[in-house]
Image (cartoon, rainbow, N blue to C red):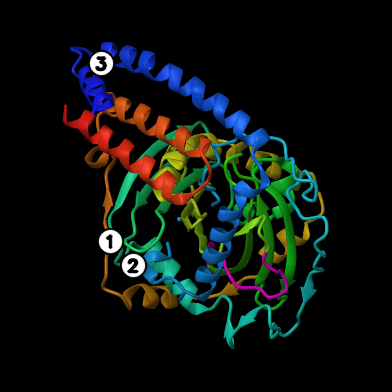
Amino acid sequence: MTLVSVLLEILQRPTIGDVLAELMMFMAPLWIAVFVGVLVGWSWKPKWASLGWEMLDSSSVSNNSSSAPPTASASSVSASIPSLNSLKLQLPSCISWIGDDGIDKGAAQVAPTVDSDCSSSQLKTENSVVLAEDDLEHLCRLVEVKDGGPAWIQMMDRSTPTMTYKAWRRDSDTGPPQYRSSTIFEDATPELVRDFFWDDGFRSRSKWDDMLIYSSTLEECPTTGTMLVHWVRKFPFFCSDREYVIGRRIWESGRSYYCVTKGVPCSSVPRRNKPRRVDLYYSSWCIRAVESKRGDGQLTACEVLLFHHEDMGIPWEIAKLGVRQGMWGAVKKIDPGLRAYQKERASGAALSRYAFMAQINTKVSADYLRSLESSSNDSSEIETFGSSEKPTGRNIPRLLVVGGAIALACSLDRGLLTKAVIFGVARSFARIGRRL
């Protein structure tokens, strides 16, 4: 109760400046102690301290692998928002059998397979095609806001001279937070943008997505363009790296491209404790030509509508805070990467294998897409920025309290129960401050 009374006394200061000054003086020693504790604990942590976490990881993996696939309402926004891109703080690896790139050097490399009839066990799972018309239908409903999910709440509206970016979020009852974004690139064609986001080689080489530390193609179909790819992404020091096995495919309608990527099971890539496998992953986008913001009536700009969500195995409230704080820092790197890709293609550079596969699309008519959209009467809502945004000044104490809770949770061992309790207490304090 002493801590509560102190916080209440601080929050009752007459001005926001006094509140901030008192909070900084109150929390500075705690932050210093937490920082020292993180460094000392991370350096001297005994091996037995990780046994409980590894057992939890193993049980979580088995539960995820046996669970049913998500429903349509839970399957919705990375091109523009690769989750937690802002949390770049990393410590050197001290595990001898894991290399600097986070890949187990003892693991066998899987060579890509080209299957002319696309009937292999990798591109089909339990007698069903990995990516089929149902995936196209679901993406179309997301694009037209007819998937029947919760309302989208706007969380960002930023721009540069050559790029405009807007982002929304909604919370699912049964899954992780879902994100929707609209990114408009000036003086770019849909075909170039399609190749750009598909080109994992350029993504790694140019470092516009510096969280991707490993990528390979496991299998590809030259008929439909379907690909099975293997990714490893670098995460902050308090999280292990994450591994993805992703199926992806593109449908074409005129000059609009419906690109679906999602996590799929794959027996040729065995599970390991590290990096941790992410099973629930959905990141799909619609790429289409739109009018330039110059207002000349010409379709010289390109819009990317992205829908992304994934379960990275960390508390969703912490993930939401990290995404919100680091979203623009990650997104603004995309435009320079795209312009570099434009220059490389204009110079006559040879197409990469990824870009070549991006040009193998399944063509569908506009009438067919309209029939998919009209097959559902469920509609969602997109809320405006003003209706969902709260005054910044009243959120500052809450941000400080929650930020301290994140640092404290991550300085302790990585038990989910401990983190959940700490974060729950912090949210209670934040609600008290908001009422005052």
Q: Secondary structure at mark 2?
A: loop
Q: Is residue 259 visible?
A: no
- The residue type indicated by label 1 comes to Ser
Q: Counting other residues with Cα less than 10 Å from the Cα at mark 3, is it few (<14), some (14-19), or many (20 or more)?
A: some
Point 31% across, 61% down: residue = 173
**Image: magenta residue range:** 254-271
Instruction: Tell me the kind of residue under disc 3.
Output: Ile
> In which quadrant is the N terminus drawn?
top left
Q: How many marks?
A: 3
Q: Which residue is mark 1?
A: 380
**Residue 320 versus residue 183: which sits nearer the camera?**
320
Q: Is residue 260 magenta?
A: yes
In what quadrant of the picture does the C terminus appear? top left
Residue ID for mark 2:
147
User: On the rendered structure, is 398 left or right of 213?
Assistant: left
Q: Nearer the viewer, mark 1 or mark 3?
A: 3
* Residue 154 highlighted magenta (yes or no): no
**Label 1 – label 3 distance at C-alpha:** 38 Å
In the image, what residue occupies the spot 22% across and 20% down? 11
Residue type at mark 2: give it.
Asp
Above/below status of 311 relative to 404? below
Report the mark closest to the observer, 3 or 2.
3
In this figure, which residue is indicated by the disc labeled 3? 16
Question: Whole-percent x and y of residue 252?
Answer: 55, 68
Instruction: Look at the picture and state if 71 lies above or below 419.
Output: below
In percent of width and height, residue 53 lies at: 56, 53
